[in-house]
Amino acid sequence: MALSAIVLPFAPAVAVSSDRRAARLLSFTLDKQEAAKGETVLAAYRLDRPAGNVTLLATTIDGAPVSFRLPQRLRPALAGDSGTIAFHVPAEAGTLSPLLLLLNVDGMLHGSQPLLVRCDYPWFFAPRVERCPFAPTQSTQAVIQHFERGAMIWLAAAESVYVLYSASRPGDDNRLERFDDAIVVGSQETVVTTEPPVGRFALARRFEPVWQTATGVRRRLGWALGPELTYTACYGYAFGGGKSMRTYVTTPDDRLLEFDTYYAPTQWRELLTIAGQRVTITGCRHRDAGDHSSQPVTDAQ
């Protein structure tokens, strides 16, 4: 836990003390790591000397301001150098999990503690990620096809094709692009042939327009390694505030993919573990554990 003072651009307009002997934060803790909306949480702090004013501020996890006030009440000790702040989790915090709590001591922001907010809607996997679903998660018709350097996934619920590029070098991010069903974005490229070479496969009908005409997709993905698979995917998305949107999608063999999808998709990754625990798919209609073959189709509608 960082205890050094920080100043954020959205800090409230309060006078910053010029006293060189301003109070220094020694400890800052919450009595729980996760709380439901309306629940009371206790934030305990200890300073190296008494302070004139101590309050809590809340932001999103990436530091963006929130639109609600944090109802709170200070319970200082007689010495004035320690105390407990009791606050209630606002109803508006339901889709902004986790909240980042900061201690405002005489106009300076100190420390930080994340607080998970209990979600309004359940995730379809366990354990949960920090963020909460922005809307109820759902099952959706999907098609997936693997390529030499990535994969394509079509989701009926999103009416879009996602192109998943594998990282070209160790340590690089896996890049991501999204193409709406109705529009193939990018300049036209000359198609040499659609006949796959030996050992490679033709593309699904939903993927071929993107692969042939969108700039760079064919070159970056290469040829298909196998036929397309149709399956029922679990699908949901979460808003983390600021510039933080995540989409979560399952594969036919019950793996969990996370897409960074704020404004335009940028990267993806597979989540094998969350908080050190192995991921399992729990709450979405999907194939039985022994049947992940997903029958290939030749004409995805």
Image (tube, helix red, strand yellow):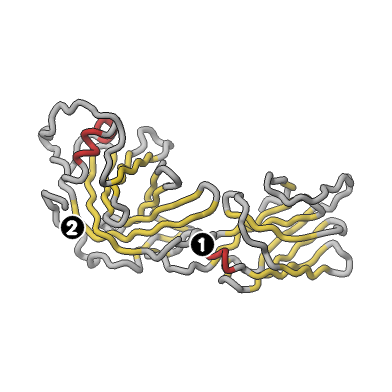
Q: Is residue 88 left or right of residue 98?
A: right
Q: Quick check: 254 above or below 149?
A: below
Name the N-terminal-most of marks 1 and 2. Answer: 1
Nearest to the eye among marks 1 and 2: give it. Answer: 1
Q: Are marks 1 and 2 in contact (CB under 8 Å)?
A: no
Residue occupying image coordinates x 21% and y 60%: 292
Residue 67 found in image quarter: bottom right
Q: CA distance from mark 1 to mark 2?
A: 34 Å
Q: Residue furthest front?
A: 182
CA neighbours of label 2 inside 10 A, class few (<14), some (14 to 19), many (20+): some
Along the line of sight, the residue nearer the viewer: 127 or 138: 138
Along the line of sight, the residue nearer the viewer: 31 or 203: 203
- From the top left corner, tell me how far across and down residue 102 is, in percent: 69, 56
Q: Is residue 68 left or right of residue 11?
A: left
Q: Which residue is mark 1?
A: 95
Q: Is residue 166 left or right of residue 48?
A: left
- From the top left corner, tell me how far across and down residue 77 is, in percent: 84, 69
Query: Which label number is shown at residue 130?
Result: none
Local SS, label 2: loop
Q: Tell me which amino acid carries mark 1.
A: Thr
Residue 128 found in image quarter: bottom left
- From the top left corner, tell me how far across and down residue 66 is, in percent: 61, 56
Q: Tell me which amino acid carries mark 2.
A: Ser
Q: Quick check: 33 above or below 61?
A: below
Local SS, label 1: helix
Residue occupying image coordinates x 72% and y 45%: 7
Q: Which residue is mark 2?
A: 294
- From the top left corner, tell me how far across and down residue 260 is, in percent: 43, 47
